[in-house]
Image (cartoon, rainbow, N blue to C red):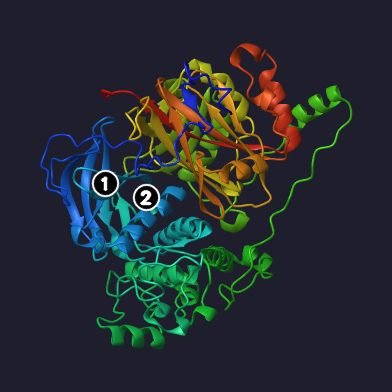
Amino acid sequence: MSDEDQPPEDPPRTVFMPPQQRTAAAPEPTSPSQPPVAPGPVTPGRVEVGAVLNHIYEVKRLIGRGGMGEVYEGVNVNADERVAIKVMLPSLAADPNVQAMFRKEARTLTRISHPAIVNYRVLAQEPQLGVLYIVTEFIDGVALSDVLKELKPSAEDLTLLLRRLAEGLQAAHELGAIHRDMSPDNVLLPDRRLDRAKVIDFGIAKDLDASKGTIIGDGFAGKLGYVAPEQFGDFGREIGPWTDVYSLGLVILATACGGKLDMGSTLVEAIDRRRAGCDLSAAPVSLRPVLEGMLQADPAKRLRSMDEVLAALDRDKEATAPPAAAAAATVFAPAWTPSTPAAKPARSRLPLYIGGGVAAVLAIAVAAFLLRPSPEPTGPGGAPATPAKGPAALAQATVKAALPGIACSWLDLVDVATPGQGGVSVSLTGVAGQPAAAQAAIDAALRGKGLTVANIDQRQVAPVGGGVCGVLDALRGFKAPTAVQGAKLSSAQREYEIMPQPEGGRAEARAVIQMAIRDPQLDFALVGIEPSGQVQVIVDSRAAFLAAAKQPGTMISTMSNDTYRLELRTFDVAGWTGIALITGHGPFDAHLIGAPPEARGDDWRARVQAAAAKGEWQAETVWYRVVDDLPNS
């Protein structure tokens, strides 16, 4: 988009491409807007109860203190949403290396989306107080460390906990970040439930890119009782996913023995205990082979990744199956074998669709797309997921089957639980033209399977205008299965205020989107969806995106080899805006995808889905709300 495309007298309300008049010297804000702090206790360098950070987050109470900062309960005063606010300690804030680590925690969490990882909201800096803070979802629960003595977990409970945490950490490892501080303190239990455990605090996470240093290099980090031997300096100090494997093994062992885990209270004792090996007698017999593989002192002999941990759990399940099933499974490897770092499996490339005449191509493509089987659910590494059992598994399958048929929606299943009062509880996220109708459809689907519905939580589902419905219905037909998608979008926060900008000029909201493209061969298009239903094709190919990323002063900045930061500007339109990432085989026809609502015609949806079938397209979206609630003068 050039200057000629944007008349200065009437600029577009939403700028998905960078305006050329943007000055190169304009400072980049830490958050979308930085208005003065609201009235309340103000002590530079510190946060006190009652303060309102950036006119958005009111500090309610201190929850606790850690090595990096203080954690508060807060509330988003605009959305009435409880949040957790982590503020860097003043004694550390002056150190630029510590600040870099704190920012790194936010970047890591921004890129991770998994039910077992706490959900990140935003990284921001309060200008008047001079504090840097991050905001996450508020988990109404307790730390695993606080209830170890009272828990009486069964073998099945421990297995479910291990699988859930391993899957969450595997999602982090896929994005190149390791936790390095896995311990019961950093596992929260919503409603005190092991099956809903969440990992928190990536404050000492280390990027797996060896070219990037950290404040602590390759030295010790983490809590003494749960760190791996290599964090003490043994075995060449090599830190990697296998480090989290060891610590997670100790977390599970501590849960099994009620917290009576003694891995040394001094550095010398800790090193000696690890070299001597762990006592697994408190663990269930069924879990001992897997824990033995996780707790090998030598990283070369240990299970090297969460993928291997999950595979070992699956093999162990086969090994303990009834005799008939076990006999059929004798071809599998033992529950654990020493291994070396395995190469990532090559990503398969789907062949291009080839057809005859235009009419035949359209008809065959639509039929092939609409009749293709749904992808099988996959686990880490693309392996078939081990199906869960019971009402929760049935509810999960039922909801996933129902979602594609809900008109004017883009919904994702966050969680399915079976609360103590009976029935199933479902949590959803996304957008819908009629959230109540969507809820009714899901309720009917669940009851049709004989399930009692305790709750359908749609607090994270936003209502969108009818103008967006046609776009949602077209894209939903080739929605990407999360487990196999090679790309990912995420928003720094769900809401952005239109505010005056530091460089002057027209008030605007600046939304920050992160995009990760894990497959270097994957072609893609990036599309903006306005609240009116207008669609703008931001870029129509990987080549165009990379070319734009190299230009100074654009909206695109490179964070790492496969991760990019996008800054999108909105002027005078409020409402929910969507960004769609469409991957597959090009070309991505901008005239077709970006056709204005009045020119789409009755067959537009079918034509888009025919192109999607031909190009093996997959789409995913991220949504954020632009608001104009505060004065702009």
Earlier sequence position, callout 1 versus callout 2: 1
Q: Quadrant of the C terminus?
A: top left
- Where on the picture, by quarter, is residue 291? bottom left
Mark-to-mark CA distance, 1 and 2: 10 Å
Q: List the single residue furthest toward the right.
A: 356
Task: Give the image location of residue 400, x and y in percent.
Answer: 54, 37
Query: Residue 380, percent across and down?
Result: 56, 57
Measured from the top left, where is residue 313 in percent x and y?
53, 65
Helix, strand or loop at mark 2: loop
Indicate the amino acid at tag 2: Val
Query: In this rendering, would 107 be left or right of 74?
Result: right
The residue positioned 57% from the left and 79% from the top of the image is 338
The residue singled out by tag 1 in the image is: 84
Q: Which mark is residue 528?
A: none
Q: Position of residue 476 (x, y in %)?
A: 59, 30
Q: 534 above or below 486?
A: above
Residue 118 marker:
2
Q: Residues within 10 Å of mark 2 (few under 14, many from 20)?
A: many
Residue 159 versus residue 555 in the image, above or below: below
Would you say residue 232 is visible in this rendering?
A: yes
Report the quarter where the N terminus lies.
top right
Classify residue 111 as left or right of residue 633.
right
Considering depth in this image, is 338 or 23 the residue closer to the camera? 23
